[in-house]
Image (cartoon, rainbow, N blue to C red):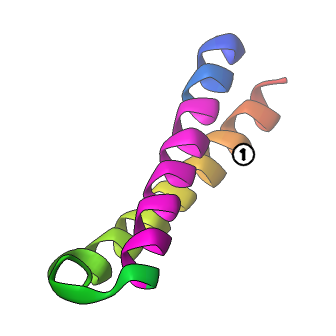
Amino acid sequence: MSGILIILMVAAMLATLGVLVVGLFAMARGGEFNAKHGNRLMWWRVRLQVAALVLFALAFMAS
């Protein structure tokens, strides 16, 4: 069970990193893409970080 939690936690952390990188590049370039998607990308980053922390807490309690 904790193996699955660890895999999900790593997936959430990698997804967070991916959204963060895309958001940073969009912010650095500016323009229409950033104006349209920048805020949404940062909200997804926050949501994924919360998911990763919850999975981390569940894996910690399961061990």
Label 1's element? helix
**Residue at the image position 48 percent from the left and 44 percent from the top:** 15
Give the residue number, with chain letter if any, for mark 1: 57
Q: Position of residue 33 (x, y in %)?
A: 19, 76
> Quarter of the image containing the C terminus?
top right
Task: Evaluate whether residue 4 shows in this view.
Answer: yes
**Residue at the image position 62 percent from the left and 34 percent from the top:** 9
| Quadrant hosting residue 49 | bottom right
What range of the chain is rendered magenta? 9-27
Let me know if residue 63 is in the magenta part. Answer: no
Q: Position of residue 13 (x, y in %)?
A: 60, 44
Q: Position of residue 52 (x, y in %)?
A: 59, 48
Frontmost residue, 8 versus 35: 35
Frontmost residue, 20 versus 27: 27
Frontmost residue, 27 versus 51: 27
- In the image, residue 16 above or below residue 30: above
Q: Label 1: how many residues lie within 10 Å, few (<14), some (14-19) or many (20+)?
A: few
Judged by its main secondary structure, the magenta piece is helix
Frontmost residue, 63 versus 41: 41
- In the image, residue 48 above or below residue 62: below
- In the image, residue 12 above or below residue 28: above
Name the amino acid type tagged 1: Ala
**Residue at the image position 33 percent from the left and 69 percent from the top:** 41
| Quadrant hosting residue 56 | top right
| 42 sits left or right of 21 in the view | left
> Quarter of the image containing the N terminus?
top right
Let me know if residue 24 is in the magenta part. Answer: yes
| 21 sits left or right of 58 in the view | left
